Image: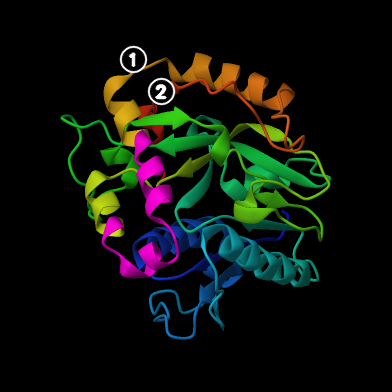
Amino acid sequence: MKKIAAITMVRNDHFYLRKWTEYYGRELGEENLYILVDGLDDPLPDWCPKAHVIPCERVQGQVAAADKGRIRLISAKARELFDRYDLVIGTDADEILAVDPALGLSLAQYLSGLDIRTSVSGLGVDVGQRLGEEGDITTDAPFLSQRHYARLCTRYTKASVMARPLEWGSGFHRIKGHNFHIAKDLYLFHFGYFDQARIRARFSDQDRLAAGWQRHLEKRSETIRLCSTLPVRDWDRSVRFARRVQTWCRPPYAWNKPAMFELKLIVRIPDRFSSVI
């Protein structure tokens, strides 16, 4: 079995960090988690005593500039981790890399069976909320027992798993200077915009608004609108199609990112995922 670490960076986001530490701690061992805290003024998590929590000076700047600063810190820490790890998983705190439960494999077992030369990506699944059918999210049950609809989205087909010391691009969207490889039966579930009430709460977060997040938050709320209004497609057929298209198509501005012609594929997440996250 390969030795695998997971790394993230957070600020004022303990709702998602709790889920992140719970999931990756179960899959990899809490002692293999590395949490960079963006700002010495941000409270440190006290629910993951075995994880490596690393306070950092606040990364200054508006959204794009701050993203670049954060990913430089994360990539530098990941390079250090390769002294004792075979693979390093990097995600935002609201992203969970999961294997299809139909395989009956843990995340560590699945990744250990892959021949990864540089990186591997899960197919991006942007989880939404179907208004009128799904209520506000609670912490009393797994996320995917409360949310059943998502958009298959290139934005979250990220180069999440690094196999040697390289450098991520902003937001883990690519490995600089290298192609990406989408693994079969591996998915990156994004939960950042899966609850209308939480999006509204983020609009009132003065820290985010001061950093230029308002337009970003408004744009991302589109996922809920699409999941609530567009026809729902079959999961198996849609993920096969999306994986093929994203593997072979590239946007003209970035050869090492996936493209999918702006298609809006809304799917129902199979019930077999309901207890995974």
Coordinates of residue 115 in the picture (x, y in percent): 80, 41
User: Looking at numbered disc 2 in the image, what kind of residue is underneath it?
Assistant: Ile
Prevalent SS, magenta region: helix
Residue interval drawn in magenta:
203-222
Coordinates of residue 187 in the picture (x, y in percent): 55, 37
207 or 193: which is nearer to us? Answer: 207
Q: Give the side of residue 118 with respect to residue 42, left or right.
A: right
Res 20 seen here: yes
Circle 2 sits in a helix, a strand or a loop, which is it?
strand
Res 7 seen here: no
2 or 43: which is nearer to us? Answer: 43
Q: Please determine whether, in this image, residue 173 is positioned above or below residue 134.
A: below
User: Which residue sits at x=50%, y=62%?
Assistant: 25
Disc number at residue 258? none
User: Looking at numbered disc 1 in the image, what kind of residue is underneath it?
Assistant: Pro
Q: Are marks 2 and 1 in contact (CB under 8 Å)?
A: yes
Q: Please determine whether, in this image, residue 91 is positioned above or below residue 113.
A: below
Please check the rendered image and state whether residue 31 is part of the magenta-colored stretch, yes or no: no
Circle 1 sits in a helix, a strand or a loop, which is it?
loop
Callout 2 crowding tier (Cα within 10 Å): few <14, some 14–19, many ≥20: many
261 or 2: which is nearer to us? Answer: 261
Q: Please determine whether, in this image, residue 195 is positioned above or below residue 74.
A: above
Please check the rendered image and state whether residue 213 is part of the magenta-colored stretch, yes or no: yes
Q: Which residue is mark 1?
A: 231
Q: Give the side of residue 75 with respect to residue 10, left or right.
A: right
User: For the residues marked 2 and 1, what is the alpha-carbon distance in whole angstroms?
Assistant: 7 Å
Q: Which residue is mark 2?
A: 266
User: Which residue sits at x=39%, y=59%?
Assistant: 16
Q: Tell me where residue 194 sits by quadrant.
A: top left
User: Which residue sits at x=55%, y=40%?
Assistant: 156
Indicate the colouring scheme. rainbow
